[in-house]
């Protein structure tokens, strides 16, 4: 078949364009994410929930296409800007991202005292904690564009504890990622129900996660023959991914840009490994 040959000038322009030197916008312009944000409100067992689903609709081959999905479990202040930021980042990577609402819509702490009370209610009642997590996880599975065979969960602080509790229910997740979560193990037998691979990122100097908790959790995971990975960042303390945590590690809570960046990068590799895109 005869193919028309471009004039030399056109060939030069195309060559320069392909290497980023003066390409037309159609060739060299950045790919712009088209993130849709859908409220997901429902009532279950008398509890009203308000979740949000983030999806890059521009990546969908068809409107009905299903994508791997990640549930984002909030820290002790409840679902807010930080969770939505992470969900948007996940959507830009090609995942569906569901911001969970463990507390329920009627509980939105206004200060750390209220947050401590809200989080404490669930940490002292693990059965309730797991029930709420499962309610959110099942709602994510029901969403039109979610591939139920390719799911994971990530969580921060309270949510980092939460994703471990979700895994302990035996939920059919491919993996969970805990960022500076509580790592206490309340029942060594729980690990035998875990199907997910488990990744944990911790500040090595986090005063809220004693070594005995780490040892107990790892013993639980090993007893259940769970594939796990624990990364600890020297000098980092609790809440190292939270920019609002301040910059004074001596307080036990502080943002650490290095730990934040490296943990997110490692999480991306993990999700790519277990979910693909």
Image (cartoon, rainbow, N blue to C red):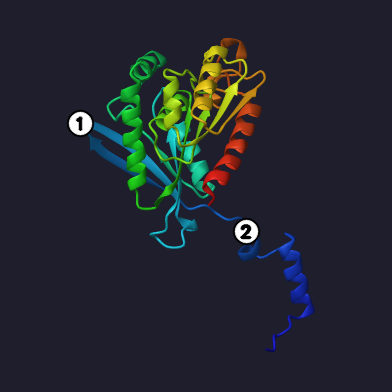
Q: Is residue 55 shown above or below 103?
A: below
Q: Residue at x 37, y 16 (%)?
A: 120
Q: CA distance from mark 1 to mark 2?
A: 49 Å
The mark nearer the N terminus, 1 or 2, is: 2
Q: Which mark is residue 46?
A: 1
Confirm or deny contact between disc 1 and disc 2 (CB under 8 A): no
Residue 94 is situated, as x and y percent measured from the top left of the image, at 51, 50
Q: Residue at x 62, y 18 (%)?
A: 204
Callout 2 crowding tier (Cα within 10 Å): few <14, some 14–19, many ≥20:
few
Judged from the image, the secondary structure of the residue bearing numbered disc 1 is loop
Q: Residue at x 46, y 58 (%)?
A: 60
Q: Considering depth in this image, is 189 or 20 the residue closer to the camera?
A: 189
Q: Is residue 129 shown above or below 14?
A: above
Residue 24 is situated, as x and y percent measured from the top left of the image, at 66, 65
Residue 16 is situated, as x and y percent measured from the top left of the image, at 76, 65
Can residue 80 be seen here?
A: no
Q: Is residue 117 shown above or below 267?
A: above
Callout 1 crowding tier (Cα within 10 Å): few <14, some 14–19, many ≥20:
few
Judged from the image, the secondary structure of the residue bearing numbered disc 2 is loop
Q: Residue at x 55, y 28 (%)?
A: 200
Look at mark 2 in the image and give the residue it sits on: 29
Can residue 117 be seen here?
A: yes
Q: Quadrant of the N terminus?
A: bottom right
Tally of numbered discs: 2
Q: Foreground mark, 1 or 2?
A: 1
- In this rendering, position of residue 20 left or right of residue 239: right
- Residue furthest to the bottom in view is 2
Q: Which mark is residue 236?
A: none
């Amino acid at each position: 078949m005869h193919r028309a040959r471009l004039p030399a000038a056109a060939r030069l322009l195309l060559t320069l364009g392909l290497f980023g030197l003066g390409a037309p916008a159609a060739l060299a312009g950045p790919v712009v994410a088209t993130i849709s944000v859908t409220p997901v409100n429902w009532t279950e067992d008398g509890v009203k929930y308000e979740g949000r689903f983030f999806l890059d609709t521009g990546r969908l081959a068809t409107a009905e296409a299903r994508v791997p999905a990640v549930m984002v479990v909030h820290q002790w202040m409840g679902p807010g800007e930080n969770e939505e930021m992470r969900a948007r980042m996940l959507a830009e990577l090609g995942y569906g991202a569901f911001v969970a609402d463990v507390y329920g819509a009627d509980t939105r702490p206004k200060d750390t005292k209220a947050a401590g009370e809200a989080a404490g209610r669930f940490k002292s009642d693990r059965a309730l904690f797991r029930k709420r997590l499962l309610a959110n996880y099942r709602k994510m599975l029901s969403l039109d564009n979610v591939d139920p065979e390719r799911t994971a969960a990530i969580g921060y602080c309270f949510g980092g504890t939460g994703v471990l509790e979700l895994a302990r229910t035996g939920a059919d997740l491919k993996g969970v990622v805990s960022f500076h979560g509580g790592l206490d193990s309340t029942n060594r037998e729980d690990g035998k129900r875990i199907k997910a691979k488990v990744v944990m990122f911790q500040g090595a100097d986090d005063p809220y996660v004693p070594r005995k908790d780490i040892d107990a959790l790892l013993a639980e995971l090993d007893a259940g023959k769970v594939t796990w990975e624990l990364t600890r960042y020297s000098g980092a303390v609790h809440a190292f991914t939270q920019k609002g945590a301040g910059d004074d590690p001596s307080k036990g809570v502080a943002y650490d840009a290095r730990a934040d960046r490296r943990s997110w990068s490692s999480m991306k590799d993990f999700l790519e490994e277990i979910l693909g895109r």
